[in-house]
Image (spheres, grey):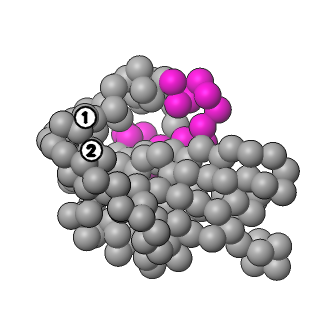
Amino acid sequence: MKLAKLRRKDIPRCVEIEKVLFAGDDPWSARAFHSELDSGGYYLGAYTPEDVLIGYGGLAVVGSRGDYEASVHTIGVDPDYQGQGIGTALLRALLARADEVRAPVFLEVRTDNDRAQALYRRHGFEQIGLRKRYYHPSGADAYTMMRPAVSKQEVG
């Protein structure tokens, strides 16, 4: 598995994975992925040696020098490839980008997604809030989680 910048030609595959992962909610459309790439988001794809997209992750960084904030917008891994460290690799790469600008990182995760919550906790995230009925149309709740910015010494 290799990580590389997400390619626009892989957006249809992202949409396929979204429909499987988030069938009970509102999976991202091709338009949503294009919009994220157009806005300058940091998006990576996870690829097999045969160059097949098996996962993706995206991070937005906003603010100005010395006052950046980052948000993990999405991480998705094809269910056939879950449990192989792909989600962890994607998250670590996104966090490395946030660490470059020493930004705290925020995200939302379903309250019933224990596996994802455990991954985030292993990487320094703590639950800081609850968003009732965050996901639509299911009405599932989400935790807001945050990982503090790393210090200059931790980055380099």
x then y, percent, for residue 98: 66, 57
At horizontal 45% and vertical 29% (from top left) the residue drawn is 33
Provide the residue span drawn in magenta.
35-53
Asked whether residue 38 is drawn in magenta, I would say: yes
Looking at the picture, which amino acid does disc 1 mark? Asp
* Residue 140 in sight here: yes
Give the mark, 2 or 1, whose residue is nearer the N terminus.
Answer: 1
Residue at figure coordinates x 74%, y 45% from the top left:
63
Q: Is residue 21 left or right of residue 33?
A: left
In magenta stretch: residue 33: no
**Mark 2 touches mark 1? (CB < 8 Å):** yes
Q: Give neighbour class at mark 2: few <14, some 14-19, many 20+ (Cα, 10 Å).
A: some
**SS of the residue under disc 2:** loop
Q: Position of residue 103 (x, y in %)?
A: 70, 60
Q: Is residue 3 visible?
A: no
Front position in the image: 4 or 50: 4
Q: Residues within 10 Å of mark 1 (few under 14, many from 20)?
A: few
Q: Residue at x 59, y 24 (%)?
A: 38
Callout 1: SS? loop
Identify the amino acid type marked 2. Answer: Tyr
Q: Nearer the viewer, residue 58 or 2?
A: 58
Across and down, in percent, residue 130 comes to 36, 61
Horizontal relation, residue 36 to residue 32: left or right: right
State which quarter of the image contains the C terminus.
Answer: bottom right
Name the residue carrying label 2.
135
Question: Residue 26 bears which disc, if any?
Answer: 1
Q: Quadrant of the rendered structure where residue 120 is?
A: bottom left
